Image (cartoon, rainbow, N blue to C red):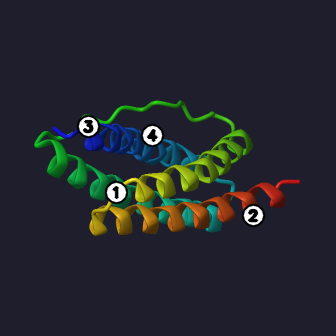
Amino acid sequence: MYPYYRTLVEDIATAINGEYSAVQCYKKLARLAPNEAERNQIKEIRKDEKMHLQAFQTIYTQLTGQPSSPQVTEECPDDYRAAIDFAFRDEQETVDFYLDIADQTQDPYIKETFKRAAADEQNHSVWFLYFLTKRR
């Protein structure tokens, strides 16, 4: 394996764990949602996260020849407001991380996949911010 891909592969593995953790967290978040509108939006966000997870796992397998073994790396709070705050912060941080991954590769598919995921994460963070401001 080339040294260039070592860092890229490690970052993609981190992204996989992040997406897997988000999928698990948003399942809990949807159950905690105070109304159907928020529950449905969280389910839509979770659907996006599942798509990211699948795309990242495919890239990881193509680069390494091995399937990934995703793990939950951050526990989701049990309180709805705390979980929404947690999700907002996580989505915001993930935007920059995904753009960094896109910048470190010359592969057009990987670059576009992570740029698209970064745009989705930004959209998700806006939804979570909206839910937070409604609670004030």
User: On the image, which quarter does residue 40 sit in?
Assistant: bottom right
Alpha carbon distance from label 4 to label 2: 22 Å
Q: Residue at x 30, y 69 (%)?
A: 108
Q: CA distance from mark 3 to mark 1?
A: 13 Å
**Residue occupied by mark 4:** 21
Q: Are marks 3 and 1 in contact (CB under 8 Å)?
A: no
Question: In this rendering, would 84 be left or right of 95?
Answer: right
| Mark sitting earlier along the chain (1/4) | 4
Q: Image quadrant of residue 77? A: top right
Q: Is residue 17 left or right of residue 99?
A: left
Query: What residue is disc 2 on?
Result: 130
The foreground one among 29 and 13 is 13
Q: Which residue is mark 1?
A: 105
Q: Point out the tag, 1 or 2, that comes first from the N-terminus.
A: 1
Three-letter amino acid code at the position of disc 3: Pro
The reply, left or right, for residue 3 in relation to residue 65 is: right
Dot 4: few (<14), some (14–19), or many (≥20) neighbours within 10 Å? many
Of circles 4 and 3, which is in front? 3
Looking at numbered disc 2 in the image, what kind of residue is underneath it? Tyr
Q: Position of residue 58 (x, y in %)?
A: 21, 54
Compare marks 2 and 3 and give the one earlier in the sequence.
3
Q: Quadrant of the C terminus?
A: bottom right
Amino acid found under the numbered disc labelled 1: Thr
Name the kind of residue labelled 4 in the image: Ser
Q: Closer to us: mark 1 or mark 4?
A: 1
Any mark on residue 3, and which? 3
Of callouts 4 and 2, which one flags the residue occurring earlier in the amino acid sequence? 4
Give the crowd class for mark 1: few <14, some 14-19, many >=20 residues within 10 Å.
some
Choose between 92 and 29: the one closer to the eye.
92
